[in-house]
Image (tube, rainbow, N blue to C red):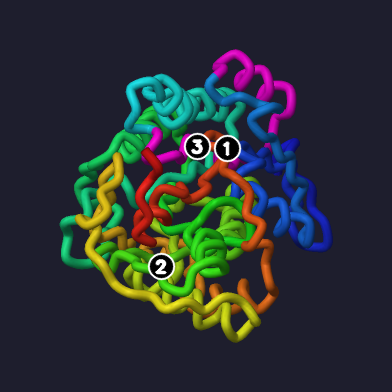
């Protein structure tokens, strides 16, 4: 048992779990889940810890000495990432920030749980992507996240890289909050039907992250328990069918229910291309760690029955956690950006 662990009632109580990107959609979900459990969470948003500052990251982790680090920080404005003026920020956060955390975790011997994305794949595979499938990102955001993965693998011997996608929840900018907002003001929406993926409820993902953090921080991981894993809501759907499910559940909860029509992505091009297929195979995580998220329709119904703050969704910071970029939802809904 290490200095970061104590034995309480037969259970190992670990030290602090340091969370970066605490101001983002996933970061807020992790904080909600941690508030109901026994883990001591140290949530840091970008103002508290800028992961692009290597000296600040090293000093922070050396002083706080967390039992485990969850990196939920990231530059997630997918369309803005294509702009030349944003190149420095995208790579500084998603590649260099990941590297800074990996080095600092290795220096203090703390496991690193690093969030990545389905956008590392090009979307041409007919079925769900496995962890060992070849990465071939088709936009700058995906390329920067893939580079961040490489940095974590090279610098942090004890790491978990968790790829996820189509994140949704009660706050932040994501597909559900955008559909709710648009549906409240429109009688009809046109949504793309040629993009498929696995919608992932932020609170379900947060619960799984804390479970993994508890075990990793308590030293219960064998060497094979580390590595790269996919984690996403169970089930595959298209943006169009996802939108229809959102409004069916929303109507049952007294929310908007506009008509939804299918369209092709080519009809509404965006600055950043999206993979046509973002489905992730999560069997490796289930077999190795006993974790599998519930079907996304169940999670969606649960979210909307509780009348979330989706009708007052705030803006994404772009650099403080995996908020689904608003551009994806706007494109899926057949909305052109103003010139």
The residue beneath circle 3 is 74
Q: SS at mark 2?
A: helix
Which of discs 2 and 1 lies nearer the camera? The answer is: 1
Which of discs 3 and 2 lies nearer the camera? The answer is: 3
Residue drawn at the location 62% of the way across and 72% of the way down:
303
The one nearer the camera, 273 or 221, is: 273
Q: Residue furthest top?
A: 55
Q: Position of residue 40 (x, y in %)?
A: 77, 47
If you read the primary sequence from the N terminus, does the residue marked by circle 2 or circle 1 appear first?
A: 2
In magenta stretch: residue 64? yes
Q: SS at mark 3?
A: loop
Q: Is residue 278 visible?
A: yes
In magenta, the rendered stretch is 53-80
The residue beneath circle 2 is 287
The residue beneath circle 1 is 317
Q: Position of residue 247 (x, y in %)?
A: 50, 77
If you read the primary sequence from the N terminus, does the residue marked by circle 3 or circle 1 appear first?
A: 3
If you read the primary sequence from the N terminus, does the residue marked by circle 3 or circle 2 appear first?
A: 3
**Whole-number angstrom distance, CA of label 3 to CA of label 1:** 10 Å
Residue drawn at the location 16% of the way across and 65% of the way down:
126
């Amino acid at each position: 048992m290490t200095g970061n662990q104590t034995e309480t009632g037969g259970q190992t109580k670990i030290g602090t779990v340091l969370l970066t990107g605490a101001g983002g959609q996933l970061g807020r979900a992790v904080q909600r889940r941690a508030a109901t459990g026994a883990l001591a969470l140290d949530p840091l948003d970008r103002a508290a810890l800028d992961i692009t500052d290597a000296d600040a990251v090293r000093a922070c982790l050396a002083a706080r000495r967390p039992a485990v680090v969850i990196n939920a920080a990231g530059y997630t404005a997918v369309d803005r990432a294509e702009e030349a003026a944003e190149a420095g920020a995208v790579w500084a956060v998603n590649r260099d920030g990941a590297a800074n955390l990996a080095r600092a975790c290795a220096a203090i011997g703390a496991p690193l749980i690093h969030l990545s994305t389905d956008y590392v794949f090009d979307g041409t595979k007919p079925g769900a992507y496995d962890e060992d499938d070849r990465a071939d990102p088709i936009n700058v955001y995906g390329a920067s996240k893939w580079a961040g993965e490489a940095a974590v693998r090279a610098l942090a011997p004890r790491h978990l890289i968790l790829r996820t996608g189509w994140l949704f929840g009660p706050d932040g900018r994501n597909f559900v909050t955008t559909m709710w907002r648009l549906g409240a003001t429109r009688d009809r929406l046109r949504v793309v039907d040629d993009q498929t993926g696995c919608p992932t409820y932020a609170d379900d993902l947060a619960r799984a992250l804390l479970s993994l953090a508890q075990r990793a921080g308590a030293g219960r991981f064998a060497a094979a328990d580390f590595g790269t894993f996919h984690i996403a809501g169970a089930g595959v759907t298209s943006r169009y069918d996802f939108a229809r499910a959102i409004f069916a559940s929303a109507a049952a909860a007294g929310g908007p229910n506009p008509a939804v029509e299918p369209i092709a992505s080519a009809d509404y091009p965006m600055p950043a291309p999206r993979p046509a297929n973002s489905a992730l195979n999560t069997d490796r995580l289930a077999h190795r760690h006993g974790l599998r998220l519930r079907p996304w329709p169940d999670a969606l119904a649960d979210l909307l029955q509780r009348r979330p703050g989706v009708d007052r969704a705030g803006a994404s910071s772009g650099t403080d956690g995996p908020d689904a970029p608003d551009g994806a939802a706007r494109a899926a809904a057949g909305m052109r950006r103003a010139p």
